[in-house]
Image (cartoon, rainbow, N blue to C red):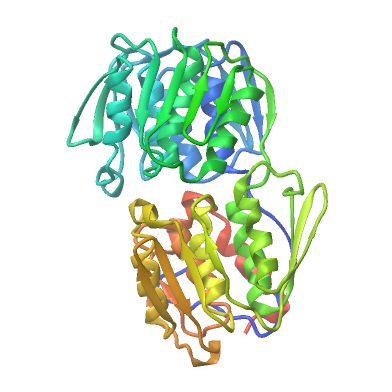
Amino acid sequence: MESSAPLPTAAGPVRATVTVPGSKSIANRALVCAALARGTSTLRNVAPGEDTAAMIDCLLALGVRVSTSGEVATIEGGDGRVRGGGVLDARLAGTTSRFMTAVAALGDATSTVTGGEALRRRPMSDLHDALRSLGANLTSDGGCLPVAVARGELSGGVVRLRGDVSSQFVSALMMIGPLLDDGLRIELTTPLVSRPYVAITASVMSSFGASGITVGDRGIGIEPSSYVGCDYHIEADASSASYPLAAAAITGGSVRVDGLGEDALQGDARFADIMESMGCSVKRTKSSTTVTGSNSLRGVDIDMSEISDLVPTVAAVAACATSTTRITGVGFIRRKESDRIGDLVRGLVAIGCSAVEEDDGLRIEPTPTSTYHGAPLLVHDDHRLAMAWSLLGLVVPGVSVDDPSVVAKSWPEWWNVRTALLGDVHR
């Protein structure tokens, strides 16, 4: 779609059944564990987005044998070691850059982890310092990418790490923990944010044979063990599922997402619960989640520290509610692909919605959507902002986004799915 073209709005309730891509959060962890496993692994329902592609390309640069066919990836593991010696370009994928920095520390030769300009501005000194304290050799300029990584005297032990900066730092260290001679004990000096992502990491590690993993409020323990190749199916991406489910909420329609059931591993599957608290009805089965919208959405006061990727989606729904929403606990998302608080507030204000930035979140005081007006909205290289703006465009005529292609980071087919969602209610 063209960046200058206003997004088509919905003339009535959206009703559809949607299949979303596989979880990129789970896929990225499974790819790392498979690369470090003994034997061959087959991953199924691998997400097609740029983040996953960046992870696979970095593994190839480390000397890991990876082949893909559609949504299936086959990985020949290195039994705890990687060759190293290459340039690992994470593009704009923060997860890839963090995970690959840790994995490169297991390499037989020095690797350089780098990425796109926006990613090179994001601070990673906490992870770099942690790896140095464990014996790895890292050289970077001010704790940002690019960083040169070599194994050094990497042996494991105890490392102290802030828990309120990025759970990806914690997960990166966790995944190399079983392969260190002394195992790993991560002592958290501040409360852990996005804890469900750490739980995903522990679950995936266990699926690949790692044992002796304990996750507590202020510490994580990893005993020495090993990974073993396996056949692993990746569940539907809960973060991506939030967009079609939100479309049902704000149009008063009903959307079912297949592949994301009541036993979902991902914390972001809680999005349906948030919609229920805002007045929607929710139905879950073993294999699907359905949200049916309400004619009168209500605001919520919610701490989203553990499900921060959902903040833009919840904010878009909140702009269509009848009362105030306050989102807290997410000050750290200013350091995501964009300033996800400031940029989100500025976009909401641009369409006429009253929104205020707070120290650890934002407050949204909506008025009827009929009072809003179209505007060109900026995505700031952030796929989640682009998809949140696309939701507002369902009910606010004249909304456009400056870089529609950014959704390729996680869901390349989103614009086609959005068009299909409109169906007979396209205006």
Q: Is residue 222 above or below residue 278?
A: above
Question: Would you say 120 lies left or right of 58 here?
Answer: left
**Residue 61, quarter of picture:** top left
Compared with 80, 266 (above or below) is: below
* Between 387 and 57, the one nearer to me in the picture: 387
Q: Residue at x 57, y 72 (%)?
A: 317
**Front one among 60 and 210:** 210
Tell me if 90 is positioned left or right of 51 in this view: left
- Compared across the picture, whether 412 is left or right of 382 comes to right
The image position of residue 216, as x and y in percent, is 54, 32
Q: Is residue 223 left or right of residue 343?
A: right
- On the question of residue 24 being in view, the answer is no
Quarter residue 362 falls in: bottom left
The residue lying toward the viewer, choosing from 412 and 360, is 360
For the point 65% across and 55% down, the residue is 270
Q: Does any portion of residue 90 appear in the rendered image? A: yes
In the rendered image, residue 261, in percent from the top left (x then y), is placed at 76, 49
Residue under the point 61% across and 38% down: 46
Q: Quadrant of residue 329?
A: bottom left
Residue name at image x 56 percent, y 64 percent = 415
Q: Is residue 26 above or below residue 334?
A: above
Of residues 303 and 199, the one drawn nearer to the viewer in this rendering:
303
